[in-house]
Amino acid sequence: MAAAAIRIENVEVDYAAGRGTMRRILNGINLEIASGEFVSIVGQTGCGKSTLLRLILAEEAPTRGRVLVGGRERSQPDRSCGYVPQRYSLFPDKTVLGNVTFGLEVTAGGFERWRRKKEFREEALRYLRHTGLNEADAQKYPHQLSGGMQQRVAIAQALILHPPILLMDEAFSALDPGTRAGMQRLIKELWRESGTTIVFVTHNTREAVCLSTRIVALAKNSTGERGSSVALDIPVTHADFDSDHEEITTLVQRVEAATMPSTDASKLDTSKYVLL
Amino acid sequence: MSLLRIRAVPNRYTAWTLSWFLFAAGTLAYFYAAQQRHHENPDDRVMPTVSQMFTAFEDAALKPAEEEEVQEGAASQSLWQRMGNSMLWKDTKATGRRFLISVALLFPGVLLGLHMAMFPYIGSFFLRFVQFFDKIVALSLLPILFIAFGIDELSKIMLIVIGVTPTIILDTFNLSKSVPHEQIVKAFTLGAGEFTIAYRIVLKQIFPRVLNSIRLNLKAVMLFLFAGEMIASTDGLAYRIALLRRHMGMDTILPYVLWVALLLFLVDLGMSTLNRTLHPWFQEA
């Protein structure tokens, strides 16, 4: 197995629930994601999917335990993880080209930024073409693009820096079904080409099954501490868009069963699920 | 057809006519009333007629103020020279200079508001104080300002700064806070540092709204400036209005009031045009 890109050790997350009480969102999560994996995190609303992603992003710190990315703990988001959120992924005051070259420019800094302007532009256009956009689109502002095109730009913006890990938080959930299917194929293609580790948060189980090599299902644990979530690891080795329809349906049912709020971890068939 | 339909769409000419209707009605009503008063009392000074106002404005725009000495050879001066030495131009220049300095001094307030929003320690340090300061009625500080800074320019400019800056600081603070958190996280993941995010992401995004906020506060700036000029000044548009009030010079006061409104309107229009030109993405967003 490849080296761990992300290691989550005994992580607990508590939030203030008012009147001096705390609510545990994640309870004793252990997770290891290897380099080059495509891992989807699924679960119902409020089970802690986005919290888990924010921990990996270092946007927030766990109450207990630790999160290592590339072998180190971080105090705030940095270039080690690319990020594509559901909304507001682009800077509205910059053109599409400006959005994609932004990362290259700030990384180069000062004089280099001006000297290599043409090179950055060519690189950005190459990435935009790769995500299905053309030179005319590059001159537009984000509000002039459709939701699907905006997310294509957001992906190009993140991938142009070659991040070892790409975190996507419900990145396709605001898109219509047709656009969404196109985006799913695009991200899978880019993942295969780049070998980037992708952590993909979604509430759409079918999407997770079709995209990932592995699914982490979070379920509110009725037997656990104060309603916190348990995480179940479900390997998905054969699923693909072209896979047998029945196979996908079976997998979807399995994952959905694992994310039910009443899931009692002690009663799950451990030959099918691995309790994280 | 009902006029009070929410989904009504007036045609272009109707909308244009309606938009000018109150101007026309107000002007006609004034001149009718002025005519009536002058019919009853030809020496009436409360409501001057059009010709009286025109003559007074022409004098103001082409002749020096009464208190100034008439320069030698004034009669042979060109129109531009006469306008340059005129009462109106000198008053406009004096008020305009104070106004521009005051507006320029609002921009450090913008930077403070931005830093308060971006850096929590700076926010904690300043926020409560600025919120309290914002509640102080600036005009109530006028005597203190005159005692502390004298009756020169500084006290008038300080009055405007104290009156308007806290509002601009708080507005910038709120605008900066409203930038989606996702964008700040995204910028970090793209390698941007703290100040790059503050200036290249947040300030650039909120700047059109900040300019709009300053536009909305232009009248407040002018209000404080007029208060200062009326109380302690030897030149300026408000000084002249206050001076003419003593002589019941309504024929000059009314054109001066309209002149001030026109100047403010033009400044507002200029800023609006500048905003649209500099930020093409904003108007359409």
Image (cartoon, coloured by chain):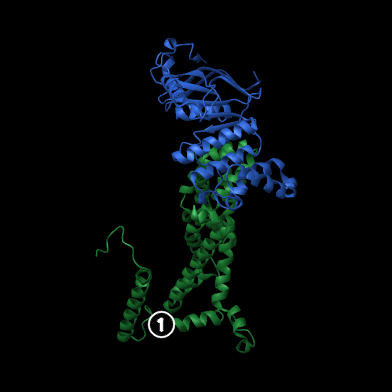
Seen from the viewer's position, the closer of residues B208 and A192 is A192
Residue A8 image-quadrant placement: top right
Give the drawing colour for chain A.
blue
What amino acid does circle 1 point to? Val
Which residue is denoted by mark 1 in the rendering? B50
Which residue: 67% across, 48% down?
A: A121
A104 vs B277, left or right, is right
Q: Is residue B105 above or below residue A213?
A: below
| Residue B156 seen from this side | no
> 10 Å neighbourhood of mark 1: few (<14), some, or many (≥20)?
some
Which residue is pictured at 57% across the width and 80% down the height?
B64
Disc 1: which chain?
Answer: B
Residue B192 appears at what percent x and percent y? 64, 40
In the figure, the shade used to draw chain B is green
Q: In the image, A183: left or right of B199?
A: left
Residue A3 seen in the current view: yes
On screen, residue B173 above or below A185: below
Q: Position of residue A240 (x, y in %)?
A: 52, 28
Percent across and percent down for residue B138 are: 48, 54
Check the picture and name the quadrant holding the N terminus of chain B. Answer: bottom left
Q: Where does the image place residue A114, in percent across and percent down from the top left?
A: 72, 49
Question: Is A11 or B173 nearer to us in this picture?
Answer: A11
Q: Identify which residue is drawn at 65% across, 44% down.
A: A126
Compared with residue A259, is residue B78 higher up or lower down, i.e. above or below?
below
Q: Residue at x 49, y 11 (%)?
A: A271
Q: How many marks?
A: 1
On screen, A2 above or below A103?
Answer: above
Q: Secondary structure at mark 1?
A: helix
